[in-house]
Structures are given as C-alpha cells and as structure tokens.
Amino acid sequence: MKEITIVINGQSQQVAKATKVIDLLAALGHAEQGMALAINQNIISRSEWPDHVLQDGDDIALFQAIAGG
Amino acid sequence: MLTIADKTFSSRLFTGTGKFSDKKSMVDALAASGSQLVTMALKRVDMQNRDDDILAPLIANGMNLLPNTSGARTAKEAVFAAKLAREALQTNWVKLEIHPDPKYLLPDPIETLTAAEELAREGFVVLPYVHADPVLCKRLEEVGCAAVMPLGAPIGSNKGIRTQDFLEIIIEQANVPVVVDAGIGSPSHAALAMELGADAVLVNTAIAVAGDPVAMSRAFAMAVASGRMAYEAGLAGQVQQAVASSPLTAFLEGA
C-alpha cells in the first residue's frame, strides 16, 4: 500500500504513505504562518510538523487565523 | 505607558480586525489607529474557499496579536481554541471569550473562570472578556489573569458605556489592567471609559463599519489619548447646585 486515506476537515483524501504534516500543508498550498492543526483531537505543535508522520485513517482538523474582534 | 504581562504599550487603543470591508481598509485603519495590539479569530479552514491572508500585513506593521476564542461555548472548547491559537500565531496571549448565546453574545462567567484558571496555570497571558461584574473580575485576577476586559454593552451594539457604575467599581478594585471591551460605538464612549480610569479600550465594529474607517481610527486614537489625559489630570468633582465661576460682586446694584 503506497497511499493512505486521511480526512481533512471532513474531506477524505489520499496521500502517500509516510507523508509528514509539513508535506501535507505544502501540498495543500498553505503558508505555515497562521495555521494550526489537530490530528484525532490532539494538537500537533509546530515544532513537530517536520517529523510527525500521518497514519491511515487520521482525522485532521486544520485551522487558520482570520479577522475577528 | 501601559504594561500588561511582558508587553508595554504606548497606545491605549486596542483594535479588532473583524468586519472591515477589505484587507486594505483594515490595514490602513489599524495603522491610523496607532494600535499596538489587535485581535484575531480562528476558524476551521474552508477547503474550497480560501480566506484572505490578513496575518502577513499585520505582522509587517509590527502589531502584537491577541487571538480570541470566539466560537467556544464551554471552558473545554475555549482551552482547546487557545492552544490552537498559540500554535497558529505563536503567542501565549489570549482573549478568552465564551459566549454560548448568539443573540446577545454575553459571556458565560462560570465557563470563563474555569478556562481562565486552567489557561493561566498553563502559562497563557489571559485577558478574559466578561460582563462588568466586579466580583467576577476579582476572581479572574486571583486565578492569574493578566487583565480583565469587562463590557460596556453587547458586542457590536455600539450602545456605549451602559455599565458605568460597575466599571467604576471594577477599576477601583482591580490590581490588573482594565480594558473596556465591547459596545464602544463612538469616540466619546471611548473617552468616557478612559476618563473613568480604564487602562485601555478595545474597539472593532465602530471603526470597521464607519463610513471612513481610517478617519474614525484617528478620531478614536485622539479620544482615547484625551480621555486618559483627563483622567491623569484629575477631573473636577460634580455637585448638585451651581457654583459660580465668576465672582458675584454685586457691582451693578444701585446703578
């Protein structure tokens, strides 16, 4: 199996096995600034992004800073 | 100068980034306000529609960021939101706001106190948005909040300082800065809050939806500075009866 299935904000997606968080964000075209994410309800801190490997079935919640009062 | 936790501010006008018609208008207005602390919110990324990146220009303008926990309805959600915001914006500052009721957006005091205690214990600089409740503000101070942010009127209502008597008690009792947040609809409202002795005000809607947000930002900056100056100068007291400002010398009698 070369690909795994993950869910990002409710959308199912195939990514290569051994994809890291930082690779995923780059593939999605997101700047790292202003982003945060949780995998299976656990927040993955920025310092872990280069090393954290996604697993099959991971439920990823991706957040970003926006305008607000 | 105003100091909150580890930061010092020369401007006592804090601003929100919401409700501006576009990014340029927001950046220009915030720059004109002289504000050094601006609030931001967090949302789940919409995988179809990208939101404008407003963060880069704020950072480029040297703004300190104050993420809020808007959208949280419980202490647990607010703590989670604060931790996400810390990752997203790389700051341990948080405007703690928990308002489960969308009609009046009034803050839940019990959930707020619970979340404040946990976040302060975990090293966050917590600025809680609360009703103008002097007892609650003391409790929040005791659990380690860096400031308190009592409301003047409901969020976005522009009704002004409707909680004046209670704000006065909060200001009198507080050992942490008091930032009047929500309801400030005009520069005169901001000036009043500052004259009462508030350490700062937080304004968003009144600037963002003004006909000319840049000019309104300047008006607010002047009002806040003016109100603070008046407070520091020591306002003259009020009395019921007239007290003559000119000497009553009866010089026309018998003329």
Image (cartoon, coloured by chain):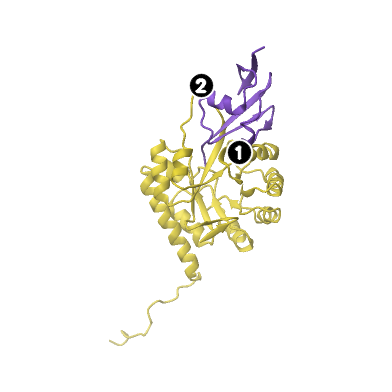
In primary-sequence order, the first of circles 2 and 1 is 2
Amino acid type at mark 1:
Glu
Residue B82 in sight from this viewpoint = yes
Q: Which residue is mark 1?
A: B87
Which chain hosts label 1? Answer: B
Provide residue B166's location: percent of width, then percent of height.
60, 57
Going 48% across and 58% down the picture, which residue do you hit?
Answer: B10
Q: Secondary structure at mark 1?
A: helix
Q: Quadrant of residue A10?
A: top right
Query: Looking at the rendering, in which quadrant would you find the N terminus of chain A?
Result: top right
Which chain hosts label 2? Answer: B
Q: Secondary structure at mark 2?
A: loop
* Disc 2 and disc 1 on one polypeptide chain: yes
Q: Which chain is purple?
A: A
Amino acid type at mark 2:
Gln
According to the rendering, which colour does chain B have?
Answer: yellow
Q: Quadrant of residue A47?
A: top right
Going 61% across and 41% down the picture, which residue do you hit?
Answer: B86
**Disc number for residue B48:** 2
